[in-house]
Image (tube, rainbow, N blue to C red):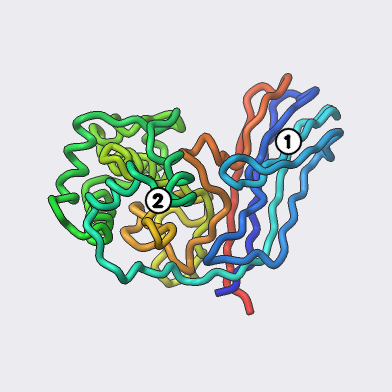
Amino acid sequence: MRYKIIHETEYTYSIPVTISQHLIHLEPINCERQKWLQHSIEVFPSPAYQNSREDIYGNKVTAFSIEDEHKIFKVTARGIVDVFDNSIPKKNIEWEKVKYRLKNPKNEEDIKASMFMFESPLVSFDDAIKNYAMESFKPQRDYIESLKDLNHRIYEDFKYSPGSTKIGTMPSEILRERKGVCQDFAHFMIACLRSLGLSCAYISGYLHTRKKGEQQFLGADATHAWVSVYIPNEGYFELDPTNDCIAGEEHIVVGKGRDFGDVSPLKGVITGGGSPILKVAVNVEQTE
C-alpha cells in the first residue's frame, strides 16, 4: 500500500509570541515493513535556528527556535510511504519462555529490547494491572494467542472517549475509569506486558483515512498510537488495542519509544501567547 500523508498542526495565539523553542518528532523512521519515498516538514514562521539528530530509539528529532514575533505557528509534514503487512510469527512459543529469554539474553537484539521492559514516566504498573494481564497470559499459553487476547479484551472492556483523559493520565487510572483514547490504551497494554516481564514499545504514527462510506478506524484523522511487542528471533509484532487488530498495512509508523513522552509530535516553550487555539488535521490517502 502506498500512501500520501499530510499532517498539519496550527496554533493561533490571543497575544503575540515573542520567542519560542520547539522539539518535534515528525520525520518518520524506516522499518522492516515500511519505506518512506519522500518526506518534508514546513515551519511557519521560519526558524532562526534548527538542528536534527537521532535519539537512542532511532527516532529523528528536530529542535528549532523561532525568534520573530508571531500570533500563528504552523507545522506541516508531508510524505509518501510504502507500507507492507505485519507478518505474524509462525512458530508457537509459550509466553513464559519469552520472559525467560529476556531475563537471559542471547544476542544483541535481546539486550536492546530490555530498554522497553521497565516502568517509564507515563507507564507504571501495579498488582491490579498485572492481575488484569494474567487473565490473558495463562500458564504455558502461546505468546501470540495471549497477546491477541489481551488486545481484544482492552477493546471490549474500555470505552473510546475523546476528552476523558489528559496526556499524563496513568495506566492505573485508565484501569479504574475504563475509558480513554488510543494513547491511553497503548500505555495500558504496555503496562500490562511490562508487569509480566515482557518487552514492548509505544508506537506513534498514522492510520489510513478510509473512503467515505467505509468503516473508519477509531483514532483516524489524528496521530495514532499502538504497541510493538518484542519476540525473540522474530523481531517486533504490532497490535492496536483501540481498534482490536494487528497493526498492518494501514498503520504507518512515525516514531518508537518507551511511552508518548519519547515520541510526542510537537512540544515546546513559548514567551507570550496567551490562550492558544490548537487545530490538528491528519489525512492519509492511498495513492498509486
The numbered mark, 2 or 1, whose residue comes first in the sequence reads: 1
The answer to whether 205 is drawn above or below residue 12 in the figure is below
Q: Quadrant of the N terminus?
A: bottom right
Q: Which residue is mark 1?
A: 63
Specify few, some or many for label 2: CA neighbours under 10 Å numbering under 14, 14-19, or 20 or more: few
Q: Which mark is residue 116?
A: none
Which kind of residue does numbered mark 2 sit on?
Lys
Residue in the picture at 61% in, 59% down: 30
Residue in the picture at 36% in, 63% down: 246
Left or right of 43 on screen, residue 213: left
Helix, strand or loop for disc 2: loop
Q: Position of residue 84 (x, y in %)?
A: 51, 71
Specify few, some or many for label 1: CA neighbours under 10 Å numbering under 14, 14-19, or 20 or more: some
The answer to whether 234 is drawn above or below residue 7 in the figure is below
Q: How many numbered circles are shown? A: 2
Q: Position of residue 159 (x, y in %)?
A: 28, 46
The answer to whether 81 is drawn above or below residue 281 in the figure is below
Q: Which residue is mark 2?
A: 106
- Foreground disc of the pair 2, 1: 2
Residue in the picture at 22% in, 52% down: 153
Q: Position of residue 8 (x, y in %)?
A: 66, 50
The answer to whether 248 is drawn above or below residue 51 in the figure is below
Residue in the picture at 70% in, 32% down: 22
Residue located farthest toward the bottom when viewing the structure as drawn: 288
Q: Nearer the viewer, residue 117 or 121?
A: 117
Q: Position of residue 221 (x, y in %)?
A: 52, 55
Left or right of 58 on screen, residue 187: left
Helix, strand or loop for disc 1: strand
Q: Quadrant of the C terminus?
A: bottom right
Tag 2–tag 1 contact (CB < 8 Å)? no
